Amino acid sequence: MSPRTPGPTRRSVRILIPAIGVPVAVALAVIVPMQANAAVDLPDKTVEQLLQFARSSDVSALSGTIEQRSELGLPDLSGLTGAGGAMGGSSSGGGTGGTDAAASAGLDELLALATGSYDARVYLDGEHARLQVLDRMAERNVYLSPTEAWYVDSETQAATHLTLPEGTDVEQLKADAQAEAQRLADEAKAEAEARLPDGQSLPTPQEVLDQALARLDETTAVSVGTDGRVAGREAYELVLEPRTSDTLVGEIRVAIDGENGAALAASITARGASDPAYSIGYSEVSFQAPDASVFAFEPADGMTVTEQVAPISTADEIAQWKADAQAKADAAEGATVPDVPQPIVHGEGWTTVVELDAQAAMAALGEQAAAEGDSTGSGEGSGSGDAAASAEQAAEASAMLETLTQPVDGGRVLQTSLLTVLFTDDGRVFAGSVPVATLLDVATAGS
């Protein structure tokens, strides 16, 4: 028998990272650069036709090997998490060290998946999916099915088993979700129609695409590139190039399967660079249904298994939650608690800069949390502990910021090959795919 441990652990966090990655990897699964080949001569398509072709793709089964490569120019992130890092947490004191270390391990994996280089196998057949991340001397697997999910780490010999509550009617759950999605779509359509001038109707899908391409053309040159091969398959190439030189992005290339319209390759190249800053994709792929055995998992003897039950709410529970939220909002009317400041958008297109007053936002969130605690009585006797925790978190955040960034006039800056983030001394944050000088100009103009 495998020993089983109840309750949440870091595995409940870690399962979300690769589990979310499965549909993303399936949707984006790509490898670059695409190999141009004179022997490939697919039927000509315009940009509009190629987008429609990709949109109509109905691939529901595949297996393949994904390769992600990232050269973003990020500083070394290993010191931010894990033992001894700025975000590693204490190893003593009330037993919280284990929790902090577990959270750091999950953050390590998230950073590696988002910004690192790795190989993985992906399998898909209808409602069954598997992602197999291949580490140097081990592997991590995520198995997904309509009724359960597994996250398995071969290095630690640990697994998390996520199941639905006992008695859950999966088919009814699907029907309820579809009905809710249709209701929301109908509401959105009705609201959109109500805002239209008399005599006008909502645009057709074709008109929406035409309008989107027209807007995109204002900032981006979109073209169909050279036919080529990706993972042995003939593919079209869609190329997007910013019309401005004031952005860090040089071009984006996407390869689309010439037979079924599935995405096969994509890359983002920084301005002035010859190699992609980021690419992810297939080195091999088959669109035949994988053998059912690849979706089956049974924990080996000695493997530690943590059982988790997915928090599935019933329709009545959702309705009650909405009613409680509305009652809480009504009770808060007239209160003096400040609103959280919203982001400010400067510019447009590829040179867009987003500004957030982080200092004011954190203060407003703190006041809102305090107000909620006062109204429920949950904040009694916890003030000093909360203050100490907040001070510790602020110190950790400051250490992390100093590790990641470089000093500039008026603040500190984090710059990668595709994105720049400016943290000003007065607590504002600016971000965009633009040079540091652009962010400094925007910050100075708004100060």
Image: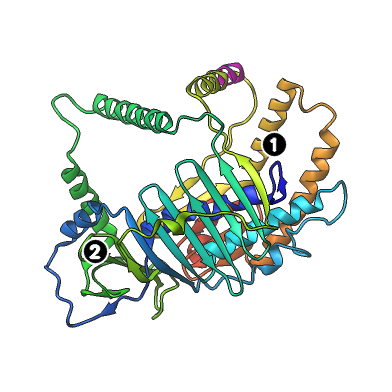
The amino acid sitting under disc 1 is: Gly
Q: Where, by quadrant of the figure, is residue 31 drawn? A: bottom left
- Is 328 included in the stretch rendered in magenta? yes
Q: Earlier in the sequence, mark 1 or mark 2?
A: 2
In this rendering, is residue 358 above or below 108?
A: above
Q: Position of residue 196 (x, y in %)?
A: 22, 28
Left/right of residue 242 with respect to residue 414 in the rendered view: left
Q: 119 or 38, which lies in front? A: 119
What secondary structure is found at the residue carrying circle 1?
helix
Residue 88 placement (x, y as % from top left): 75, 59
Query: Label for residue 396?
Result: none
Taking the magenta stretch, the answer to whether it contains residue 372 is no
| Residue denoted by label 2 | 222
Q: Is residue 410 visible?
A: no
Point 21% across, 48% down: residue: 209
Residue 375: % across, % down: 71, 21
Name the side, left or right, on which 276 lies relative to 92.
left
Which quadrant holds residue 350?
bottom left
Identity of the residue furthest to the right in this view:
93
Q: Tell me the magenta residue range.
A: 327-333
Seen from this angle, which residue lies furthest bottom? 38
Which residue is painted at 68% across and 39% down in the image?
363
In the image, residue 280 above or below residue 396:
below
Q: Which residue is mark 1?
A: 366
Relative placement, left or right, of 159 versus 381 is left
Question: Looking at the image, can residue 116 be seen?
Answer: yes
Nearest the camera: 78 or 215?
78
